[in-house]
């Protein structure tokens, strides 16, 4: 239900909005957060693209995780967490959320080098801003 509402809201913005979106891929069996992503496109289109990449043999942690789930006959569900002003804000918020989810023991499909570097940088910036 929530995904349907999020997609309906996103469609009001148009299929190619200038805004950014932060979303999570969830395991429908337990609601576990497996991946945090961001896009400037419709999140449904983005997830379909990720599913296609996984089916075509992507060797990223995300691709392997999606393939394992698909092999069990399960498709990850998507939850839109934020709609923001632009792509830069979506990337910043996505990186911060990824770091938070790792601290919670989630988002294991984000464990690639680029994501790790961006999430660590976001955490360092946040810590610097919180110090007097």
Image (cartoon, rainbow, N blue to C red):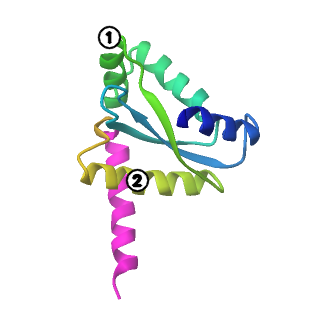
**Residue at (32, 58) in percent of width and height:** 120
Crowding at mark 1 (Cα within 10 Å: few <14, some 14-19, many 20+): few
The front one of 48 and 91 is 48
Q: Between marks 2 and 1, how big is the CA–CA gap?
A: 28 Å
Q: Left of 99 or right of it: where is 18?
A: right
Residue 113: quarter of image: top left
Q: Relative to 85, does residue 51 appear above or below in the rendering?
A: above
Q: Which mark is residue 97?
A: 2
**Residue at (54, 37) in percent of width and height:** 2
Q: Which residues are magenta?
A: 110-132
The quarter of the rendered structure image containing the C terminus is bottom left
Verify whether residue 119 appears in magenta: yes
Verify whether residue 131 appears in magenta: yes
Crowding at mark 2 (Cα within 10 Å: few <14, some 14-19, many 20+): many
Q: Which mark is residue 87?
A: none
Q: What secondary structure do most residues of the magenta stretch adopt?
A: helix
The front one of 127 and 103 is 103
For mark 2, give the secondary structure.
helix
Give percent across and percent down for residue 93.
48, 56
Q: Which mark is residue 71?
A: 1
The front one of 58 and 74 is 74
Give percent across and percent down for residue 61.
31, 30
């Amino acid at each position: 239900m929530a995904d349907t509402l999020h997609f309906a809201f996103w469609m009001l913005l148009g299929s190619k909005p200038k805004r950014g979106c932060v979303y999570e891929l969830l395991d429908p069996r337990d609601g576990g957060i497996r991946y945090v992503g961001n896009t400037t496109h419709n999140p449904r289109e983005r997830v379909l693209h990720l599913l296609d990449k996984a089916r075509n043999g992507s060797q990223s942690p995300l691709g392997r995780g999606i393939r394992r789930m698909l092999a069990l006959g399960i498709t990850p569900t998507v939850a839109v967490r934020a709609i923001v002003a632009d792509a830069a804000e979506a990337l910043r918020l996505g990186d911060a959320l990824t770091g938070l989810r790792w601290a919670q023991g989630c988002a294991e499909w984000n464990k690639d080098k680029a994501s790790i570097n961006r999430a660590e940088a976001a955490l360092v910036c946040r810590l610097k801003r919180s110090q007097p």
